[in-house]
Amino acid sequence: MTLPPTSNTQQEIIIAEYLSEIGFRYTQQEFFPPYKVDFYIEEINTAIEADGVYGHLSKRKNKTNNTKGVMAGIKQIAAVNQKKRAPRDKWLAKIIDEHLTEVDSPPRGGVFHPSALGNPCDRYLWHYYNAKIPEQVLEPRIKRIFQNGNFLEDRVALWLTDLNILIDREISLKQELPPISGRMDFLIKHLEYGELPVELKSINKFGFTQLSAAKPEHFTQLQMYLNMSGYDHGTVLYECKDDQNIKAFLIERDEEAWADILKRCFDIQAMTIPPNKCTGAWYCMCKKVKGVEDES
C-alpha cells in the first residue's frame, strides 16, 4: 500500500532527485505496519527517511539530521548494490559524456524571458537581464535532460496532430515595454475554449505526485503567454519522467498577476546594482555570481 506524501520538504526533494539521477526506482510514503517510510527501494529492499537511511546500513544505526549525511548513505547503498550488477562499460559512458559536454553561453541581456521570470529571485533576474550570469560548463546529464524535453515536445506534437487539434507549435511572442520575449509550446483547438495555448513540462515522480495545481513558476510563464497573446485560458501539461503519467491544469488569464510581472521587470530595469540577498531556491543560479550572500 502506497500512501501519498504528506509533505514536500527540501530534504525530500533533494533525495528524490538524487535517487532518480542514480537510477533507483522508488515508492514514496510506503506503509510497513505500524511504520511509514519516506522512500522505499524494492530492488535492494531499502527504506530511506529524510533524516536517515535504513536497510543495508541499518546495522550501523546510521541516522542523521543532515541532508549530506543522508546522501552519503545513499551513495554507500549504491556502491553495495553495484557489486551485484554487471560490469560497467566506462569507455562508452565516457565518450558519450565527452561528446555532450559543452560550455553554456550566458544570456545576452537586455530582455526578459518567461523561464527567467519564473525564478522568484530578483538578484538572479537582475544578473540575467544585465548579462552578468557567468558562463558555465553544461554537464552531460543536464544536456540529456534538455534533449529529453525536446523529444517530449515532438511526441506530444504527434499526439495532437493525430487528434487533429494542433494549430501551431513553438509560437514566438514579443513585446517592447518592458522587453519580453518567449516561445509558446503549442496552440490547440480545445473542445470548450476554442484556441488554447499549452505549456508542456516534464517532472520526476516525486514532484508529479505532489502536483495539485501548476507550479508557481509555470503559472507565471503561462500568464505571460496568455497576456501577450490575448487568450483567456491556457493549460500546463505535465508528464512524469518515471512512469509517463500526465496531468493537465487549466489556467485563466489573470491581469493582476500580469501587472505584477510587468512591475517586477520595470523595477529590475531601474536598479543600478543587484539586490544583496538570494531569494530563490537552494539551486538558484545567482549563487554562482561572486558576492552573493547565501542564507541557506
Image (spheres, grey):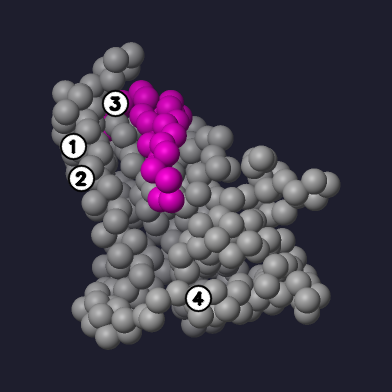
Q: Which residue is mark 2?
A: 154
How busy is the neighbourhood of tag 3: few (under 14 within 10 Å), some, or many (20 plus)?
many
Give the residue number, with chain letter if any, for mark 1. 158
**Residue 15 in the image: above or below residue 294:** above
Q: Residue at x 46, y 65 (%)?
A: 23
Mark 4 vs mark 2, CA separation in Å: 37 Å
- Amino acid tagged 4: Lys
Q: Earlier in the sequence, mark 4 or mark 1?
A: 4
Nearer the observer: mark 1 or 3; the answer is 1
Task: Please name which of the two marks, 4 or 1, marks the residue nearer to the observer.
Answer: 4
Q: Secondary structure at mark 2?
A: helix
Separation of marks 4 and 3 at Cα, in angstroms: 50 Å
- Is residue 13 left or right of 38 when viewed as pictured? left
Q: Which residue is mark 3?
A: 196
Identify the residue position indicated by label 4 in the image: 84
Query: Is label 4 in a helix, a strand or a loop?
Result: loop
Q: Position of residue 1 (x, y in %)?
A: 66, 40
Give the magenta-colored segment's residue range: 229-255
